[in-house]
Image: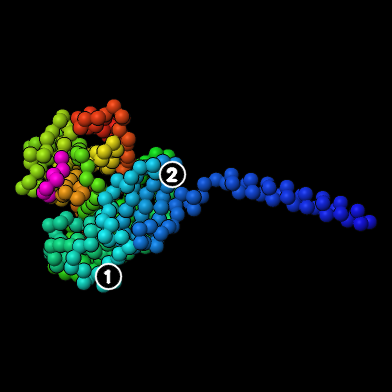
Amino acid sequence: MHNYKQRILVFLLTWFLIFSACADKNATTKPITTEDGVKKMKWNGWNDAYQITNATTQVIVVPAIGRIMFYGFKDGVNILWNDPQTFGRTLPQDLTSVRSWTNFGGDKVWPTGQNDFPKINGMAWPPDPYFDGAPHTIKVLADGVEITSPVSEFCGAQSVREIRLAEEGSRLTIRQIIKKIKQAKILSVEPIRYTIWNVTQVNSPDQTLFNLNANSKFPNGYIMMSQNGASNFSVEGQTGIFIPSASSDQKAGADSDKWLAAIIDDVVIGEFFTYTPGETFPDGGCSAEVYTCPSYTELELLSATKLLRIGESIEFTIAWELDKLPATAITAAEKRAAAVAWLNSK
């Protein structure tokens, strides 16, 4: 009888171990879930950062300051410029009291042209803090996140940005919407002409590249927007080449109709968008602008403008991609040729 009980116990134990092994095997082979591709993490002093990854690419979004702060290959460096002195910081709770700009870096949007800042915000600078620096709410998606700004007390609108990383490769699609929720603080500025002004701060590149519009409204296909920099802008075919200055700020714009890019060491970042001829764009018709200073460069994409009343919205979807230049591309001209060929193939 005793041996019989032992055999029963051994039999049950054996089946338990087999079942457990099968369960473990199933657990390790489960399909990718949201938790595998999108993870909440602590990053550079912020406790609520979100990491989005696939096999080759990493993106980090920090909703506490409402922006993308990291974009790059997993085995490479961050293409986006960050100011380490701002790590872990947030804006004060009373955003209407903000009178100085906390330049965190990374990528964010502004809701109007800079020329309209004084009449809408009551000051020429800084930008509207409800869009640039305020805490955003976050929703986790299967392949990314959605961040939503608070409603601005200045312009009465808010932004919603869906940030999605492709299953393979580096393509990051950013669907951006600005919604008009209420009247502006200064009623006399209504109705406001909104734009989705995308500002991406990248580490200082060797060169930035404009896709020049073959049917440009500008005599040379571009305009200089600063007193400095004209000598650093040149044209090759349908490509504008803008070289950053190590000693001064400079800015240029164009009515580009496909992409804007920068070459940083041996990596190209391309920002792709759809351009609609005949629409009204900020700054005399610019859909793409580049600002450079000794510390970093801004790639800026601008949507067409639109008058919004309460309940209406404007939408502008862009996409980023990275490309590793071939080892044979050594000189600036060789890198540029390889980059332009890749950009035009997209």
Q: Is residue 249 left or right of residue 335?
A: left
Q: Position of residue 251 (x, y in %)?
A: 13, 47
Label 2's element? Answer: loop
Q: In this rendered view, identify the residue nearer to me: 213 or 332.
A: 332
> Residue sitting at 27 percent across and 70 percent down?
92
Is residue 38 inside the magenta stretch? no
Residue at which label 2 appears: 54
Q: First in sequence: mark 1 or mark 2?
A: 2
> Residue sitting at 88 percent across and 56 percent down?
5
- The extreme right residue here reads 1
> Residue sitting at 15 percent across and 30 percent down?
236
Residue at which label 1 appears: 92
| Mark 1 Cα-neighbour bin, 10 Å: few <14, some 14–19, many ≥20 | few
Label 1's element? Answer: loop
The picture quadrant where one finds residue 42 is: bottom left
Q: In this rendered view, identify the residue nearer to me: 89 or 270.
A: 89
- Looking at the rendering, the stretch of residues picked out in magenta corresponds to 243-250
- The extreme left residue here reads 227
Scheme of colours in the image: rainbow
Q: How many marks?
A: 2
The picture quadrant where one finds residue 64 is: bottom left
Q: In this rendered view, identify the residue nearer to me: 21 or 211.
A: 21
Quadrant where the image shows the C terminus: top left
Q: Amino acid at mark 1?
A: Pro
Q: Is residue 56 left or right of residue 326?
A: right
The relative height of residue 265 versus residue 62 in the rendered view (above or below) is: above
Q: Is residue 309 visible?
A: no
The relative height of residue 253 versus residue 139 in the rendered view (above or below) is: above
